[in-house]
Amino acid sequence: MANLNNSLSDGAFADWLLNFSNLLTAAPTTYGLLAGDAVIVATQNTAYQAAYVVANDPSTRTPAAIAAKDSAKANALAVVRPYVVRISNNPAVSDEDKTAIGATVKKPVPSPVPTPTAIPQVSLVSLQPLQAALKIVNAATPTSKAKPFGSIGVELWAATGTTAAVDPEQLNFQFIASKIPTVLEFLAAQQGKICTVAARYSTRGGIGGKAKTGPWSALLTFTVA
């Protein structure tokens, strides 16, 4: 939509208003309006176009002609602006028609990504020296590799020690896992230790840049090879 205020150049407004009036007159119902509305707009268009021509012709460009043009522009703006807003806000008018007539096509407000509710299921696929291959899937759909809606992957948390951890809060964040299987690597000093693993789905950073995380998986324990 044109920036409909008095700062819009006279020529640009003349072009915009002519197009708006012509399309509205040809098919008012396309834009959610009535034939009577098109007549009102056409009257303003005629008045402004005439005043604009007089004010821009060197032979008739006088202070009075310029004042008359400015008055016609202000009147047209006051009358037409509400129609433009109605068209822009009308969901029954297609984006293509809004663009053609010069009304704003409003961008849809993105829905916030919901907090994940799915619970990951973590299982041990294989053990190699200082490596563990893990399979992490949605417990509700264990045969599918698809992640829950809005999730970018699963946070993988782990800890190694002489005893198994009993709470996810005892684990340390490792990385965001997005592939199946996921490989967790260990240091030589961790060989023979007990590893405890848990995971939870995570979204992208939302408002304030903070990601949302879902519930924890069950804890998985194994001995590092």
Image: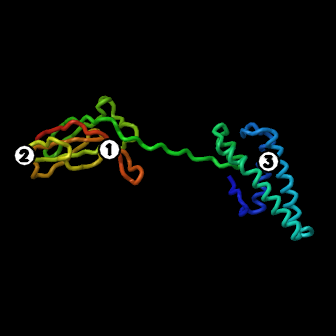
Q: Which mark is residue 162?
A: 2
Q: Which residue type carries mark 1?
A: Thr
Characterize the local packing of mark 1: few (<14), some (14-19) or many (20 or more) Cα atoms within 10 angstroms: some
Give the secondary structure at mark 2. Answer: loop
Q: Nearer the viewer, mark 2 or mark 3?
A: 3
Q: Is residue 100 left or right of residue 43?
A: left
Going from N to C along the chain, the mark reached first, 2 or 1, is 2
Give the secondary structure at mark 1. Answer: loop
Q: Work out whether residue 224 or residue 14 is closer to the camera in this orientation and state it.
A: 14
Characterize the local packing of mark 2: few (<14), some (14-19) or many (20 or more) Cα atoms within 10 angstroms: few
Q: Is residue 82 left or right of residue 138?
A: right
C-alpha gap between disc 2 and disc 1: 29 Å
**Residue to which mark 3 is pinned:** 21
Q: Is residue 225 visible?
A: no
Q: Which residue type carries mark 2?
A: Thr
The part of the image, by quadrant, that contains residue 52 is: bottom right
Residue at screen point 78% across, 53% down: 17
